[in-house]
Amino acid sequence: MKVQKTGDWLAARVGDDLVMMSANAGNYIGLNAVGSRIWELIEEPRDIDELCTQLQEEFQVSRETCMGEVQKFLKELEDHRAVAFIAPSA
């Protein structure tokens, strides 16, 4: 499954963190360094497996932990309408 950014989110870096705002939705989100990196990596639609492979190269994390945490994080972003999941083409 792939994930892509959605909406009108504006982002500003504050140190290693990222502060995001959606004017249309009136939502604010703060992302830590790892969340900020995920946001950068999904600039183009990206497969979640590929995303975890990249994160494992950059951070010391097991595959299982990475998949669980990334899926949880992306679900939170989906709840804020910042991302959408794309089913694979048949």
Image (cartoon, grey):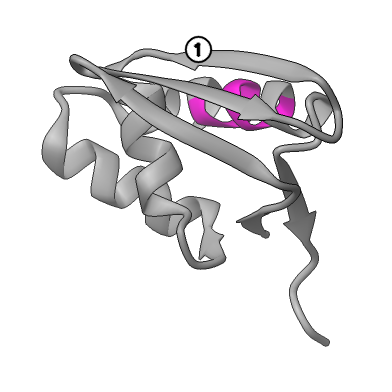
Q: Is residue 77 above or below residue 1?
A: above
Q: Quadrant of the N terminus?
A: bottom right
Q: Please identify the quarter of the rendering in which residue 73 is found.
A: top right
Q: Position of residue 63 (x, y in %)?
A: 35, 33
Most extreme residue toward the bottom is: 90
Magenta stretch bounds: 70-75
Instruction: Give the residue at x 53% y 61%.
Output: 47
Viewer-proximal residue among 84 and 60: 84
Instruction: Give the residue at x 63% y 32%.
Output: 74
- Magenta stretch containing residue 73, yes or no? yes
Indicate the amino acid at tag 1.
Gly
Q: Position of residue 84 (x, y in %)?
A: 76, 50
Instruction: Give the residue at x 86% y 28%.
Output: 25
Viewer-proximal residue among 44 and 60: 44
Most extreme residue toward the front is: 23
What's the magenta bit mostly, secondary-structure-wise? helix
Left or right of residue 85: residue 50: left
Q: Is residue 53 above or below residue 10?
A: below
| Residue placed under numbered mark 1 in the picture | 30
Q: Please identify the quarter of the rendering in which residue 39 is found.
A: top left
Q: Position of residue 82 (x, y in %)?
A: 70, 38
Q: Position of residue 90 (x, y in %)?
A: 83, 87
